[in-house]
Amino acid sequence: MEGNFPEHSLRFRTAKMLPPADGDNDFLLPPKEDMSGLSRKNAIKRLVTKVCLVGDELPKDQQLVTLLKGHFNVEIVPDNTVSDPDIVFVVKDFDSPDYYSVNHDQNNRIIGPAIIREMAARGKDGLALPRPKRPIFCLAMEGVKICISNSCGTEECHRLTELVGFMGGSVAPKVKCQEILVTAKNHGLSYKNAEESNRPVVRPSWIRSCWDRRNDISFKAEKIMDQHRVFPFEGLHLFFSGFKHSEITEMTEQTIRNRGTVVYSEREASHIIVEGVSERIDLVENQYKVTKEWFWRSIDRGYRLEEAKFPIARKRRSEHLVDIVEEPLNKSSRNNLSKDSFENLENSNASVLEYSSDDLDKPTTSSKPLDKRYLVCLEMLETEENYLRALQLIVELFKKPLEERNAESEILTKSEMTQIFGKIPPLIQTHSNIARALRIQIKQKWKTENLIGKIWTDFHADLLKVYPPFLNSYDTSKEMLVECDRKPKFHNFLKAAESHPACERNTLKDLLIRPVQRLGSVINLLKDLLKHTNKKNPDYEFIKQAREYVDDVLRRSNENRRQTDTYAELLEVLRDIHGLPTEMVSSSHQKLAQIELNVLPSGNAWKDLKGRTICLFVLTDYLLITKLRHGATNLPMNLNATQRSSKSFTLSRSMSFVAPPKKKKKYKYWGQLSLSCIRKIEKVTVNGGDGLYVLTVRDYVAGDEPMIVQPSNDYSTDGIDDFLNILCTQARVHSNRELNIETIDDNDFHRNPQFRDSEVYQLLRKKIVDSQQARRTTASQKSLEDLHVLESLGSAQHQ
């Protein structure tokens, strides 16, 4: 079909600007078409029966012709048959003269070859009849709703609207809940609507990039959306005021990553980011002064947030969280507290904690000077409420927002969330009740005889339920937090939440350590309260009991944690042993010592260990024997110690003993011995036998079986002495008999007839004789070398 290329003004379908419901004429809408003759429902049901392949190339495309005739059973009509309104024109390129020659009649139905190929690839038997005035080339934007801001320019808006329609998308007047905003700027009403609706914001280049790939039937527009998104700081110049050097370095990197520019002069900045409270700065036109929360929340959300919501505070707000380190007030500061300061504390606490109407009664304090017992009680209440606020911040600023975000796009897994935050809600419930009881007794109904200590004794069982689990998992939670902080999404979220004014520069790590500190602080306060309580006061005995109870909670928590660390250390060792029976793994065991030894010719029971390096593990009730596997990497050892330096091990849910590791296990299980079977441990001090040891074990079938060993290169004789002393100690406990390291000296070896008849002597004799012969040979060689050197020197002097 022939036709002249139209003028530039005719390249776009007629469109008009329609104001949306809220009066914002920021969007472009295509004109409505007359649907009176055909409903949309009926149009979808109708199928293509006739097509016209426009141009010279498409009729020669055998694959396309085969699909139309063979797959879709469509009749191909010649170019001159254009009178039928149901004919669909297939045009190879919508930017070609062929397209404009067909599109001069806007009632024509026009499609591109990509539609035909994609529908065939989907297995469809028919082609839906396209609507008139709606040319469609491909389905790259099928189901995509787009809102185009007029910040792109009027002509550009027309063209982008046309391209969206060509790719099967639709254009909406405003951003609601499904639309994607296309804009050239990161501000304005349309941008604000997109941010509030949490909808993507992309540049116009996204639509054009999609159009460039219109012939790729596997391509979908969402695939490249992130490459064209509008970044929060595009076009902005940021100046940082009051931050540490390390913070400025990280914030500079984040600014550049989000397409912003860092400047070093306030006058050049579009935004001045301030840490804390700063001096007044005179702003120039179109300049903003905001908190670091605006910076991090903009990065976290992926939008340039409204600056007016993040003003700089002029002074420190008393209702925010106090310093993270919870320490009782010193004597001088406590004496300086006035009644007004306590009332201010009450008002500040009321904004965070919830109380009943009874709690709002005025305190019944007298006008007399406050006694020291009352001051300590007030301090106890203040620290308790501050502690409770810290726990509530963890939930309100971190846990709940993360749960909401995870519902949309996972930032942390359920396991990670449970590991970090799972133990906090029970603490909040318990301490909410304690704070309420303290407040009633101290603030509303104060009498010097009030039973403050009884409150803590009444909650002894509750404290026992919540603190051991938290302290037991604290190290794991801390390590999990560090691990998760490596995730960019979580790191940005964490920075945004920690920059909230209520945190007052406290990090989540700082807040999570509060329960670790709290019990010790309560014990100190109870001691102080006891000191200022008369022995005749009915609360005196309750305070003593409360101090013992809280100390008991702390002691049990630490003991529970120690047992977990010990078991984790044992698992760390056992996981590196190949072939270890799983039934041997028990939390009742504890690793006391380990050492690597070389086995020399020994009794028949040890013949398959001859010449091998073994590793012995002394556990609480047995001796575990393993062989060092070839190709396994040795861990660095302390040459003068049998035990590795103690460290804090963490037992996490992810630790599985039976799970196969990625690397080759270092040891192979050989067997285990009851510690009661250890009969004798001997150290050889005979000339030529230094470093040799004899370990004799009772075999109830073959009798006593000696094993001759020497330390491997990673251990010294002092190291093996320490190991064997630990083994002797444990063996004495289990055998109920004396067992110490004995010595085989020259007298035993050469003059003791009874020893010379033993199997141990026969095994040692060859080793010692060979060692002595090797020493003599080495000494002779050294003498010959020295003689040759002297002869050479004498000959040189003579010459």
Image: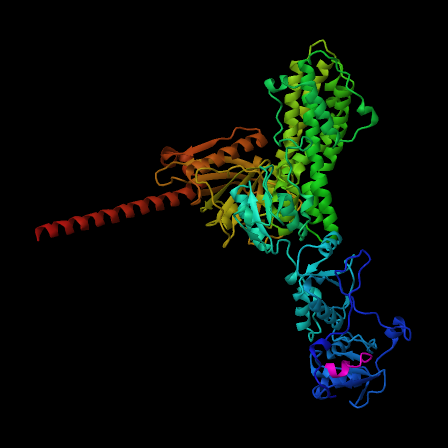
Q: Relative to residue 735, is residue 189 depicted above or below?
A: below
Q: Could you say where residue 332 lies in the image, as x and y percent from the top left?
A: 59, 18
Work out whether residue 668 or residue 523 is closer to the camera in this orientation and state it: 523
Looking at the image, the residue that sits furthest to the front is 285
Q: Is residue 692 left or right of residue 627?
A: left
Q: Is residue 502 magenta?
A: no
Work out whether residue 421 or residue 677 is closer to the camera in this orientation and state it: 421
Q: Could you say where residue 133 lies in the image, as x and y percent from the top left?
A: 81, 76
Looking at the image, the residue that sits furthest to the right is 37
Q: Residue 581: tell me if it is visible.
A: no
Work out whether residue 18 or residue 317 is closer to the camera in this orientation and state it: 18
Q: Could you say where residue 514 lies in the image, as x and y percent from the top left?
A: 65, 33
Marker count (numbered): 0
Magenta stretch: give its range.
99-108
Q: Relative to residue 521, is residue 166 depicted above or below?
A: below
Q: Is residue 722 left or right of residue 130?
A: left
Q: Relative to residue 50, is residue 410 depicted above or below?
A: above
The quarter in which the N terminus is drawn is: bottom right
Report the residue at 62% width, 22% height from top: 329
Q: Is residue 104 magenta?
A: yes
Report the residue at 8% width, 53% height from top: 799
Quadrant in which residue 466 is drawn: top right
Q: Could you say where residue 717 lies in the image, as x and y percent from the top left?
A: 42, 38
Coloring scheme of the render? Answer: rainbow
Looking at the image, the residue that sits furthest to the left is 799
Q: Is residue 194 left or right of residue 782?
A: right
Q: Residue 699: tell me if it is visible.
A: yes
